[in-house]
Image (cartoon, rainbow, N blue to C red):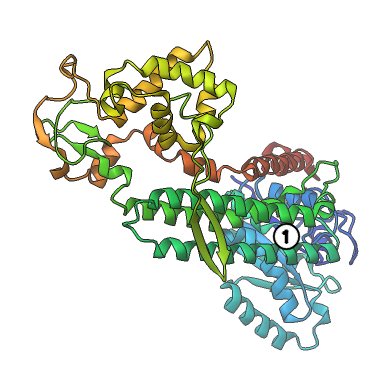
Amino acid sequence: MKTFRIALLGSIGSGKTAFFNRITSSNEPEISGGPSVTKKVVVGQATEGEFEVIDTPGFESESDKLLHAAGVIAALTLGEVNRILIFAKFERDDRMVSSIRQILSPIRRYKDIVTILVSHFDHSRNIADDQDRFSQRIKSDFNIDSILFYSILSFDNVDISMKIFNIIQQSEYRSIQLQDSEIFSQFDLLQLDDYNQTKLEKNQTAILRQFRKTARIYKYFIESIDLNDPLLIDILHELTKDIKAVANQHVEEFEILHGDELNQFYDVQGVNIRYLHHIYLKKQIWLDLNNVIKLAQTTMTKSQIHIQHFIKLCPYCKQPWMKVFGCDGETKCGNRILPFEQDEIIGQASAPKKFQIKIVDNQLQVDIVCPTSQQYSTVNEEISSKFNYIYQYFKTDIHFQKHLGQNFTILDLWNLMNQEFKNRLNDICKRINNENKGKALEQLRIYFYSFFKVENKDDNSDKSIGCGRKFNWSEQPPLSGPELNELLSQDLIDFFNRDQEKLLKDEAYFLELSYQKLVKQAIEEQKKNTKILSSQFSSHY
Protein backbone atom coordinates (compact mmCIF):
# COMPACT_ATOMS: atom_id res chain seq x y z
CA MET A 1 0.00 0.00 0.00
CA LYS A 2 1.32 3.44 -0.92
CA THR A 3 2.19 5.87 1.86
CA PHE A 4 0.12 9.05 2.08
CA ARG A 5 2.35 12.09 1.75
CA ILE A 6 1.96 15.85 2.21
CA ALA A 7 4.40 18.68 1.41
CA LEU A 8 4.56 21.89 3.44
CA LEU A 9 5.22 25.18 1.64
CA GLY A 10 5.29 28.62 3.18
CA SER A 11 7.13 31.89 3.58
CA ILE A 12 9.75 32.38 6.26
CA GLY A 13 8.06 32.92 9.62
CA SER A 14 4.75 31.39 8.56
CA GLY A 15 4.98 28.69 11.25
CA LYS A 16 5.62 25.89 8.77
CA THR A 17 8.52 24.24 10.59
CA ALA A 18 6.86 24.72 13.99
CA PHE A 19 3.84 22.87 12.59
CA PHE A 20 6.13 20.13 11.22
CA ASN A 21 7.74 19.66 14.64
CA ARG A 22 4.39 19.41 16.44
CA ILE A 23 2.78 17.01 14.00
CA THR A 24 5.84 14.72 13.77
CA SER A 25 7.12 15.20 17.35
CA SER A 26 10.42 16.37 15.91
CA ASN A 27 12.85 19.05 16.98
CA GLU A 28 13.96 20.78 13.80
CA PRO A 29 15.37 24.32 14.30
CA GLU A 30 12.67 26.98 13.99
CA ILE A 31 12.60 30.74 14.40
CA SER A 32 9.92 33.39 14.30
CA GLY A 33 11.07 36.09 11.90
CA GLY A 34 14.63 36.58 10.68
CA PRO A 35 16.42 34.31 8.23
CA SER A 36 15.13 30.87 7.37
CA VAL A 37 16.75 28.08 9.33
CA THR A 38 15.30 25.29 7.18
CA LYS A 39 17.74 25.03 4.28
CA LYS A 40 17.24 21.42 3.30
CA VAL A 41 14.35 19.05 2.75
CA VAL A 42 13.25 17.16 5.88
CA VAL A 43 10.92 14.15 5.85
CA GLY A 44 9.08 12.95 8.96
CA GLN A 45 6.12 10.78 10.01
CA ALA A 46 2.93 12.17 11.54
CA THR A 47 2.42 10.72 15.01
CA GLU A 48 -1.35 10.71 14.47
CA GLY A 49 -2.63 9.37 11.18
CA GLU A 50 -0.56 7.39 8.70
CA PHE A 51 1.10 9.94 6.45
CA GLU A 52 4.52 11.40 5.75
CA VAL A 53 5.25 15.08 6.09
CA ILE A 54 7.85 16.89 3.96
CA ASP A 55 9.17 20.20 5.28
CA THR A 56 10.82 22.62 2.84
CA PRO A 57 12.95 25.78 2.95
CA GLY A 58 10.89 28.96 3.26
CA PHE A 59 9.92 31.33 0.48
CA GLU A 60 10.93 35.03 0.52
CA SER A 61 14.46 34.32 1.72
CA GLU A 62 16.81 37.30 1.48
CA SER A 63 19.86 35.06 1.13
CA ASP A 64 20.69 31.70 -0.45
CA LYS A 65 17.64 32.06 -2.71
CA LEU A 66 18.82 29.44 -5.17
CA LEU A 67 19.36 26.98 -2.31
CA HIS A 68 15.88 27.61 -0.91
CA ALA A 69 14.11 27.38 -4.27
CA ALA A 70 15.98 24.19 -5.15
CA GLY A 71 14.87 22.71 -1.82
CA VAL A 72 11.21 23.43 -2.53
CA ILE A 73 11.43 21.97 -6.03
CA ALA A 74 13.31 18.91 -4.77
CA ALA A 75 10.68 18.29 -2.07
CA LEU A 76 7.82 18.42 -4.57
CA THR A 77 9.54 15.99 -6.92
CA LEU A 78 10.78 13.41 -4.38
CA GLY A 79 7.80 11.20 -5.12
CA GLU A 80 4.04 11.23 -5.41
CA VAL A 81 2.16 13.48 -2.98
CA ASN A 82 -1.48 13.59 -1.94
CA ARG A 83 -1.61 17.14 -0.67
CA ILE A 84 0.33 20.39 -0.69
CA LEU A 85 -0.20 22.59 2.36
CA ILE A 86 0.50 26.28 1.79
CA PHE A 87 1.04 28.18 5.03
CA ALA A 88 -0.09 31.77 5.48
CA LYS A 89 0.52 33.65 8.71
CA PHE A 90 -2.67 35.37 9.92
CA GLU A 91 -2.38 39.11 9.27
CA ARG A 92 -3.95 41.65 6.94
CA ASP A 93 -5.88 39.91 4.13
CA ASP A 94 -3.94 41.53 1.28
CA ARG A 95 -0.59 40.45 2.71
CA MET A 96 -1.79 36.88 3.19
CA VAL A 97 -3.18 36.76 -0.35
CA SER A 98 0.08 38.16 -1.75
CA SER A 99 2.12 35.52 0.09
CA ILE A 100 -0.17 32.71 -1.08
CA ARG A 101 -0.06 33.97 -4.67
CA GLN A 102 3.75 33.90 -4.72
CA ILE A 103 3.87 30.34 -3.39
CA LEU A 104 1.02 29.11 -5.58
CA SER A 105 2.33 30.60 -8.85
CA PRO A 106 4.83 27.84 -9.79
CA ILE A 107 2.43 25.04 -8.77
CA ARG A 108 -0.80 26.52 -10.11
CA ARG A 109 -1.38 23.44 -12.30
CA TYR A 110 -1.67 21.38 -9.11
CA LYS A 111 -3.96 23.66 -7.10
CA ASP A 112 -6.62 20.92 -6.99
CA ILE A 113 -4.48 19.22 -4.30
CA VAL A 114 -3.65 22.44 -2.43
CA THR A 115 -4.93 23.23 1.05
CA ILE A 116 -4.39 26.69 2.54
CA LEU A 117 -3.39 26.51 6.21
CA VAL A 118 -3.70 29.80 8.13
CA SER A 119 -1.33 29.82 11.11
CA HIS A 120 -1.11 32.10 14.18
CA PHE A 121 -4.89 32.27 14.21
CA ASP A 122 -4.79 33.10 17.92
CA HIS A 123 -4.19 36.70 16.72
CA SER A 124 -7.77 36.81 15.43
CA ARG A 125 -10.17 38.92 17.48
CA ASN A 126 -13.26 37.54 15.78
CA ILE A 127 -12.58 33.95 14.79
CA ALA A 128 -15.88 33.15 13.07
CA ASP A 129 -16.00 36.34 10.99
CA ASP A 130 -12.32 36.12 10.04
CA GLN A 131 -12.65 32.49 8.98
CA ASP A 132 -15.72 33.20 6.86
CA ARG A 133 -14.31 36.35 5.25
CA PHE A 134 -10.89 34.89 4.41
CA SER A 135 -12.35 31.59 3.14
CA GLN A 136 -14.50 33.56 0.70
CA ARG A 137 -11.46 35.61 -0.37
CA ILE A 138 -9.43 32.46 -1.07
CA LYS A 139 -12.32 30.99 -3.04
CA SER A 140 -12.72 34.22 -5.02
CA ASP A 141 -9.02 34.82 -5.75
CA PHE A 142 -7.73 31.26 -6.24
CA ASN A 143 -10.82 29.03 -6.55
CA ILE A 144 -9.58 26.92 -3.64
CA ASP A 145 -12.12 25.51 -1.17
CA SER A 146 -9.79 23.56 1.12
CA ILE A 147 -8.66 25.76 4.01
CA LEU A 148 -7.68 25.11 7.65
CA PHE A 149 -7.08 27.50 10.56
CA TYR A 150 -4.93 26.70 13.58
CA SER A 151 -2.90 28.18 16.41
CA ILE A 152 0.33 26.83 17.86
CA LEU A 153 -0.70 28.13 21.30
CA SER A 154 -3.78 25.90 21.33
CA PHE A 155 -2.38 23.18 19.09
CA ASP A 156 -4.34 19.92 19.20
CA ASN A 157 -2.15 17.38 17.43
CA VAL A 158 -4.84 14.73 17.14
CA ASP A 159 -7.47 17.15 15.85
CA ILE A 160 -5.32 18.83 13.17
CA SER A 161 -3.72 15.52 12.10
CA MET A 162 -7.07 13.86 11.61
CA LYS A 163 -8.41 16.84 9.65
CA ILE A 164 -5.42 16.58 7.32
CA PHE A 165 -5.71 12.79 7.13
CA ASN A 166 -9.38 13.05 6.15
CA ILE A 167 -8.45 15.50 3.39
CA ILE A 168 -5.62 13.42 1.94
CA GLN A 169 -7.72 10.26 1.98
CA GLN A 170 -9.94 12.01 -0.57
CA SER A 171 -6.95 13.12 -2.67
CA GLU A 172 -5.32 11.26 -5.52
CA TYR A 173 -1.60 10.57 -5.69
CA ARG A 174 0.01 13.17 -7.89
CA SER A 175 3.49 13.25 -9.40
CA ILE A 176 4.66 16.86 -9.45
CA GLN A 177 6.64 17.66 -12.61
CA LEU A 178 7.43 21.35 -12.80
CA GLN A 179 8.22 22.73 -16.25
CA ASP A 180 11.27 24.89 -16.84
CA SER A 181 9.04 27.92 -17.42
CA GLU A 182 7.45 27.40 -13.99
CA ILE A 183 10.83 27.09 -12.31
CA PHE A 184 12.67 29.94 -13.99
CA SER A 185 9.88 32.48 -14.25
CA GLN A 186 8.00 31.89 -10.99
CA PHE A 187 10.67 31.15 -8.39
CA ASP A 188 12.72 34.01 -6.95
CA LEU A 189 16.23 32.69 -7.61
CA LEU A 190 18.39 35.80 -7.34
CA GLN A 191 19.44 37.91 -4.43
CA LEU A 192 20.25 41.62 -4.44
CA ASP A 193 19.63 44.44 -2.01
CA ASP A 194 16.35 46.31 -2.44
CA TYR A 195 17.93 49.53 -3.75
CA ASN A 196 19.93 47.85 -6.53
CA GLN A 197 17.09 45.44 -7.31
CA THR A 198 14.71 48.37 -7.80
CA LYS A 199 17.28 50.28 -9.86
CA LEU A 200 17.96 47.25 -12.05
CA GLU A 201 14.28 46.49 -12.68
CA LYS A 202 13.50 50.16 -13.39
CA ASN A 203 16.22 50.46 -16.04
CA GLN A 204 15.36 47.06 -17.46
CA THR A 205 11.76 48.22 -17.94
CA ALA A 206 12.90 51.53 -19.48
CA ILE A 207 15.22 49.81 -21.98
CA LEU A 208 12.54 47.30 -22.94
CA ARG A 209 9.99 50.09 -23.40
CA GLN A 210 12.45 52.00 -25.60
CA PHE A 211 13.10 48.98 -27.82
CA ARG A 212 9.39 48.24 -28.14
CA LYS A 213 8.83 51.79 -29.33
CA THR A 214 11.54 51.27 -31.97
CA ALA A 215 10.02 47.92 -32.96
CA ARG A 216 6.61 49.55 -33.48
CA ILE A 217 8.19 52.13 -35.82
CA TYR A 218 9.82 49.34 -37.86
CA LYS A 219 6.57 47.36 -38.00
CA TYR A 220 4.61 50.40 -39.17
CA PHE A 221 7.14 50.96 -41.98
CA ILE A 222 6.95 47.30 -43.05
CA GLU A 223 3.15 47.34 -43.03
CA SER A 224 3.16 50.48 -45.21
CA ILE A 225 5.82 49.42 -47.75
CA ASP A 226 4.96 49.32 -51.45
CA LEU A 227 4.73 45.64 -52.45
CA ASN A 228 5.62 46.58 -56.03
CA ASP A 229 8.88 48.24 -55.04
CA PRO A 230 11.63 46.31 -56.90
CA LEU A 231 13.92 46.87 -53.89
CA LEU A 232 11.39 45.47 -51.39
CA ILE A 233 13.28 42.24 -50.67
CA ASP A 234 16.59 44.07 -50.22
CA ILE A 235 15.04 46.75 -48.00
CA LEU A 236 13.30 44.25 -45.73
CA HIS A 237 16.42 42.12 -45.50
CA GLU A 238 18.42 45.20 -44.49
CA LEU A 239 15.75 46.17 -41.95
CA THR A 240 15.95 42.79 -40.21
CA LYS A 241 19.73 43.13 -39.91
CA ASP A 242 19.43 46.69 -38.68
CA ILE A 243 16.86 46.02 -35.96
CA LYS A 244 18.97 43.09 -34.72
CA ALA A 245 21.84 45.55 -34.28
CA VAL A 246 19.48 47.92 -32.44
CA ALA A 247 18.43 45.07 -30.14
CA ASN A 248 22.06 44.28 -29.35
CA GLN A 249 22.70 47.94 -28.57
CA HIS A 250 19.87 47.93 -26.02
CA VAL A 251 21.23 44.82 -24.31
CA GLU A 252 24.73 46.31 -24.24
CA GLU A 253 23.29 49.47 -22.69
CA PHE A 254 21.79 47.34 -19.91
CA GLU A 255 25.11 45.56 -19.36
CA ILE A 256 26.99 48.86 -19.10
CA LEU A 257 24.45 50.34 -16.67
CA HIS A 258 24.38 47.30 -14.40
CA GLY A 259 27.73 45.57 -14.73
CA ASP A 260 28.46 46.00 -11.03
CA GLU A 261 25.02 44.85 -9.87
CA LEU A 262 25.01 41.85 -12.19
CA ASN A 263 28.32 40.71 -10.77
CA GLN A 264 26.75 40.53 -7.30
CA PHE A 265 24.61 37.54 -8.28
CA TYR A 266 26.39 34.56 -6.75
CA ASP A 267 25.10 31.48 -5.02
CA VAL A 268 26.67 30.11 -1.87
CA GLN A 269 29.20 28.03 -3.81
CA GLY A 270 30.45 31.13 -5.62
CA VAL A 271 29.04 30.12 -9.01
CA ASN A 272 28.07 33.22 -10.95
CA ILE A 273 24.31 33.20 -11.57
CA ARG A 274 24.00 36.77 -12.82
CA TYR A 275 22.45 35.61 -16.08
CA LEU A 276 18.78 35.62 -15.17
CA HIS A 277 18.00 39.34 -15.41
CA HIS A 278 20.24 39.48 -18.47
CA ILE A 279 18.36 36.56 -20.01
CA TYR A 280 14.96 37.99 -19.10
CA LEU A 281 15.72 41.25 -20.92
CA LYS A 282 17.13 39.43 -23.95
CA LYS A 283 14.16 37.08 -24.16
CA GLN A 284 11.67 39.95 -23.98
CA ILE A 285 13.59 41.91 -26.63
CA TRP A 286 13.89 38.75 -28.73
CA LEU A 287 10.10 38.31 -28.72
CA ASP A 288 9.59 41.82 -30.09
CA LEU A 289 12.50 41.40 -32.50
CA ASN A 290 11.06 38.12 -33.75
CA ASN A 291 7.68 39.76 -34.39
CA VAL A 292 9.34 42.40 -36.58
CA ILE A 293 11.35 39.79 -38.50
CA LYS A 294 8.30 37.54 -39.03
CA LEU A 295 6.33 40.52 -40.32
CA ALA A 296 9.18 41.36 -42.72
CA GLN A 297 9.34 37.77 -43.98
CA THR A 298 5.57 37.57 -44.43
CA THR A 299 5.66 40.82 -46.39
CA MET A 300 8.47 39.44 -48.57
CA THR A 301 6.27 36.53 -49.63
CA LYS A 302 3.66 38.98 -50.95
CA SER A 303 6.18 40.42 -53.41
CA GLN A 304 6.25 39.17 -56.99
CA ILE A 305 10.03 38.87 -56.78
CA HIS A 306 9.94 36.48 -53.82
CA ILE A 307 11.63 33.13 -54.40
CA GLN A 308 8.35 31.19 -54.38
CA HIS A 309 7.39 32.85 -57.70
CA PHE A 310 10.50 31.36 -59.37
CA ILE A 311 9.70 27.72 -58.56
CA LYS A 312 7.22 26.12 -60.97
CA LEU A 313 6.19 22.69 -62.23
CA CYS A 314 6.49 21.42 -65.79
CA PRO A 315 2.82 21.13 -66.94
CA TYR A 316 3.60 17.74 -68.52
CA CYS A 317 5.87 15.72 -66.21
CA LYS A 318 5.31 17.84 -63.07
CA GLN A 319 9.09 18.14 -62.53
CA PRO A 320 9.76 21.21 -60.35
CA TRP A 321 12.23 23.82 -61.59
CA MET A 322 13.71 27.02 -60.27
CA LYS A 323 14.33 29.67 -62.94
CA VAL A 324 15.61 33.20 -62.35
CA PHE A 325 16.66 34.07 -65.92
CA GLY A 326 14.45 33.98 -69.01
CA CYS A 327 11.21 33.90 -67.03
CA ASP A 328 9.19 35.79 -69.63
CA GLY A 329 8.78 33.29 -72.45
CA GLU A 330 9.19 29.77 -73.80
CA THR A 331 11.55 27.29 -72.18
CA LYS A 332 12.14 23.55 -72.25
CA CYS A 333 11.73 21.14 -69.33
CA GLY A 334 15.29 20.20 -68.44
CA ASN A 335 16.86 23.25 -70.14
CA ARG A 336 19.40 24.34 -67.56
CA ILE A 337 21.93 27.05 -67.04
CA LEU A 338 25.43 25.64 -66.81
CA PRO A 339 25.84 23.75 -63.51
CA PHE A 340 26.78 26.03 -60.64
CA GLU A 341 28.93 24.96 -57.71
CA GLN A 342 29.26 26.65 -54.34
CA ASP A 343 30.37 30.22 -54.92
CA GLU A 344 33.31 30.62 -52.57
CA ILE A 345 35.09 33.56 -54.22
CA ILE A 346 32.14 35.75 -55.18
CA GLY A 347 29.91 34.78 -52.27
CA GLN A 348 32.51 35.47 -49.59
CA ALA A 349 33.39 38.92 -50.87
CA SER A 350 32.11 41.54 -48.46
CA ALA A 351 28.97 43.29 -49.69
CA PRO A 352 28.53 47.03 -49.16
CA LYS A 353 25.59 48.36 -47.17
CA LYS A 354 22.82 49.27 -49.63
CA PHE A 355 20.64 51.42 -47.38
CA GLN A 356 20.98 53.96 -44.63
CA ILE A 357 18.29 53.44 -42.01
CA LYS A 358 17.40 56.01 -39.36
CA ILE A 359 14.42 57.19 -37.31
CA VAL A 360 13.33 60.78 -37.90
CA ASP A 361 10.35 62.23 -36.01
CA ASN A 362 9.22 58.75 -34.93
CA GLN A 363 9.20 57.53 -38.53
CA LEU A 364 11.58 55.14 -40.22
CA GLN A 365 13.56 56.67 -43.06
CA VAL A 366 15.33 54.39 -45.55
CA ASP A 367 17.73 56.02 -48.01
CA ILE A 368 19.56 54.25 -50.82
CA VAL A 369 23.33 54.35 -50.47
CA CYS A 370 24.72 54.84 -53.94
CA PRO A 371 27.98 52.90 -54.26
CA THR A 372 30.89 54.78 -55.69
CA SER A 373 31.94 53.59 -59.13
CA GLN A 374 35.67 53.01 -59.02
CA GLN A 375 37.66 53.86 -62.15
CA TYR A 376 40.06 51.19 -63.37
CA SER A 377 42.82 53.79 -63.56
CA THR A 378 42.68 54.29 -59.77
CA VAL A 379 43.13 50.66 -58.63
CA ASN A 380 46.37 49.60 -56.97
CA GLU A 381 49.02 47.38 -58.50
CA GLU A 382 47.79 44.14 -56.87
CA ILE A 383 44.21 44.62 -58.10
CA SER A 384 45.42 45.68 -61.54
CA SER A 385 47.63 42.60 -61.89
CA LYS A 386 44.91 40.17 -60.84
CA PHE A 387 42.25 41.83 -62.96
CA ASN A 388 44.55 41.67 -65.99
CA TYR A 389 44.74 37.90 -65.40
CA ILE A 390 40.92 37.78 -65.46
CA TYR A 391 40.87 39.83 -68.67
CA GLN A 392 43.38 37.56 -70.43
CA TYR A 393 41.23 34.55 -69.51
CA PHE A 394 37.96 35.97 -70.86
CA LYS A 395 39.03 38.15 -73.80
CA THR A 396 38.72 35.25 -76.29
CA ASP A 397 35.49 33.85 -74.81
CA ILE A 398 32.77 34.04 -77.48
CA HIS A 399 30.01 34.82 -74.98
CA PHE A 400 31.92 37.74 -73.49
CA GLN A 401 32.72 38.91 -77.04
CA LYS A 402 29.05 38.66 -77.99
CA HIS A 403 28.07 40.80 -75.00
CA LEU A 404 30.97 43.32 -74.94
CA GLY A 405 32.15 43.28 -78.55
CA GLN A 406 34.66 41.06 -80.34
CA ASN A 407 37.64 43.22 -79.40
CA PHE A 408 36.50 44.39 -75.96
CA THR A 409 39.14 46.07 -73.80
CA ILE A 410 40.15 45.52 -70.19
CA LEU A 411 38.24 48.72 -69.35
CA ASP A 412 35.07 47.27 -70.91
CA LEU A 413 35.36 44.17 -68.73
CA TRP A 414 36.11 46.29 -65.64
CA ASN A 415 33.01 48.40 -66.21
CA LEU A 416 30.86 45.28 -66.62
CA MET A 417 32.15 43.64 -63.45
CA ASN A 418 32.10 46.92 -61.53
CA GLN A 419 28.47 47.33 -62.51
CA GLU A 420 27.65 43.84 -61.22
CA PHE A 421 29.80 43.64 -58.08
CA LYS A 422 30.34 47.33 -57.26
CA ASN A 423 32.37 47.68 -54.05
CA ARG A 424 32.89 43.92 -53.87
CA LEU A 425 35.02 43.85 -57.02
CA ASN A 426 38.27 44.71 -55.24
CA ASP A 427 37.63 42.02 -52.64
CA ILE A 428 36.88 39.44 -55.35
CA CYS A 429 40.17 40.24 -57.07
CA LYS A 430 42.12 40.07 -53.81
CA ARG A 431 40.74 36.61 -53.05
CA ILE A 432 42.17 35.16 -56.25
CA ASN A 433 45.54 33.43 -55.70
CA ASN A 434 47.69 30.73 -57.30
CA GLU A 435 45.88 27.96 -55.43
CA ASN A 436 42.31 28.91 -56.30
CA LYS A 437 42.62 30.93 -59.51
CA GLY A 438 41.30 28.11 -61.72
CA LYS A 439 38.25 27.65 -59.54
CA ALA A 440 37.75 31.41 -59.17
CA LEU A 441 37.80 32.00 -62.92
CA GLU A 442 35.38 29.11 -63.47
CA GLN A 443 32.98 30.60 -60.92
CA LEU A 444 33.17 33.98 -62.65
CA ARG A 445 32.55 32.30 -66.00
CA ILE A 446 29.47 30.49 -64.66
CA TYR A 447 28.21 33.68 -63.04
CA PHE A 448 28.43 35.71 -66.26
CA TYR A 449 27.12 32.88 -68.43
CA SER A 450 24.03 33.05 -66.22
CA PHE A 451 24.00 36.82 -66.63
CA PHE A 452 24.33 36.43 -70.42
CA LYS A 453 21.55 33.76 -70.33
CA VAL A 454 23.80 31.12 -71.84
CA GLU A 455 21.96 27.81 -71.67
CA ASN A 456 23.48 24.35 -71.51
CA LYS A 457 23.48 23.06 -75.09
CA ASP A 458 23.95 19.52 -73.91
CA ASP A 459 20.64 19.58 -72.07
CA ASN A 460 19.63 16.14 -73.38
CA SER A 461 22.75 14.43 -72.06
CA ASP A 462 20.93 13.48 -68.87
CA LYS A 463 17.67 11.88 -69.93
CA SER A 464 16.53 11.53 -66.30
CA ILE A 465 16.26 15.31 -65.87
CA GLY A 466 13.01 16.72 -67.27
CA CYS A 467 10.85 15.53 -70.16
CA GLY A 468 12.35 17.92 -72.75
CA ARG A 469 8.97 19.32 -73.82
CA LYS A 470 8.56 23.04 -74.42
CA PHE A 471 6.21 25.24 -72.40
CA ASN A 472 5.72 28.92 -71.60
CA TRP A 473 7.29 29.58 -68.21
CA SER A 474 5.45 32.83 -67.50
CA GLU A 475 2.06 31.14 -67.99
CA GLN A 476 2.67 28.56 -65.26
CA PRO A 477 1.38 29.36 -61.75
CA PRO A 478 3.84 29.42 -58.83
CA LEU A 479 3.82 26.44 -56.50
CA SER A 480 1.11 26.35 -53.87
CA GLY A 481 1.86 26.07 -50.16
CA PRO A 482 1.41 22.26 -49.98
CA GLU A 483 3.50 21.79 -53.14
CA LEU A 484 6.29 23.91 -51.68
CA ASN A 485 6.18 22.02 -48.39
CA GLU A 486 6.44 18.72 -50.26
CA LEU A 487 9.25 19.97 -52.46
CA LEU A 488 11.45 21.67 -49.89
CA SER A 489 13.49 19.40 -47.67
CA GLN A 490 14.25 20.62 -44.16
CA ASP A 491 17.81 21.33 -45.29
CA LEU A 492 16.56 23.56 -48.09
CA ILE A 493 14.09 25.31 -45.81
CA ASP A 494 16.96 25.94 -43.38
CA PHE A 495 18.99 27.30 -46.29
CA PHE A 496 16.29 29.80 -47.22
CA ASN A 497 15.91 30.74 -43.55
CA ARG A 498 19.62 31.10 -42.90
CA ASP A 499 19.33 34.85 -42.48
CA GLN A 500 16.64 34.43 -39.86
CA GLU A 501 18.76 31.88 -38.00
CA LYS A 502 21.72 34.21 -38.10
CA LEU A 503 19.63 37.13 -36.87
CA LEU A 504 17.99 35.24 -34.02
CA LYS A 505 21.07 33.40 -32.81
CA ASP A 506 21.90 34.85 -29.45
CA GLU A 507 24.28 33.96 -26.66
CA ALA A 508 21.37 34.26 -24.19
CA TYR A 509 20.33 30.76 -25.27
CA PHE A 510 23.64 29.33 -24.12
CA LEU A 511 23.62 31.41 -20.94
CA GLU A 512 20.16 30.13 -20.14
CA LEU A 513 21.25 26.54 -20.66
CA SER A 514 24.16 27.13 -18.29
CA TYR A 515 21.86 28.65 -15.70
CA GLN A 516 19.30 25.88 -16.02
CA LYS A 517 22.07 23.36 -15.51
CA LEU A 518 23.17 25.19 -12.37
CA VAL A 519 19.64 25.24 -10.91
CA LYS A 520 19.04 21.58 -11.75
CA GLN A 521 22.33 20.66 -10.10
CA ALA A 522 21.16 22.50 -6.97
CA ILE A 523 17.86 20.58 -7.06
CA GLU A 524 19.66 17.23 -7.35
CA GLU A 525 21.98 18.25 -4.51
CA GLN A 526 18.97 19.01 -2.31
CA LYS A 527 17.48 15.62 -3.13
CA LYS A 528 20.72 13.90 -2.13
CA ASN A 529 20.86 15.85 1.13
CA THR A 530 17.24 15.20 2.10
CA LYS A 531 17.03 14.54 5.83
CA ILE A 532 14.96 11.46 6.67
CA LEU A 533 13.87 11.45 10.32
CA SER A 534 12.77 7.82 10.32
CA SER A 535 14.68 5.00 8.62
CA GLN A 536 11.41 3.30 7.63
CA PHE A 537 11.00 5.91 4.88
CA SER A 538 14.46 5.60 3.39
CA SER A 539 13.32 3.01 0.88
CA HIS A 540 10.89 5.51 -0.65
CA TYR A 541 13.59 7.91 -1.90
Name the side, left or right, on which 52 lies relative to 343.
right
The residue carrying pointer 1 sits among few (fewer than 14), some (14 to 19) or many (20 or more) residues within 10 Å by Cα, namely many
Could you say which is closer to the camera, residue 461 or residue 194?
A: 461
Could you say which is closer to the camera, residue 199 or residue 478?
A: 478
Residue drawn at x 84%, y 70% is 152
> Toward which corner of the image does residue 134 lie, by quadrant?
bottom right
Name the side, left or right, on which 344 lies relative to 48.
left
* Placement of the N terminus among the 4 image quadrants: top right
Q: Amino acid at mark 1?
A: Leu
Compared to residue 159, the image places residue 522 above or below, namely above
Secondary structure of the residue carrying tag 1 is strand
Compared to residue 367, the image places residue 410 above or below, namely above
Residue drawn at x 57%, y 71% is 361
Residue 15 x/y as whole percent:
82, 66
Name the side, left or right, on which 12 lies relative to 136.
right
> Toward which corner of the image does residue 382 lie, by quadrant?
top right
Q: Which residue is tagged 1?
A: 9
Residue 222 x/y as whole percent:
43, 60
Compared to residue 3, the image places residue 404 above or below, namely above
Q: Is residue 5 visible?
A: no
Residue drawn at x 69%, y 40% is 514
Could you say which is closer to the camera, residue 411 or residue 57?
A: 411
> Toward which corner of the image does residue 392 lie, by quadrant?
top left
Name the side, left or right, on which 50 lies relative to 157.
left
Residue 54 x/y as whole percent:
73, 52
Residue 93 x/y as whole percent:
72, 80
Compared to residue 104, the image places residue 525 above or below, namely above
Q: Residue furthest top?
A: 435
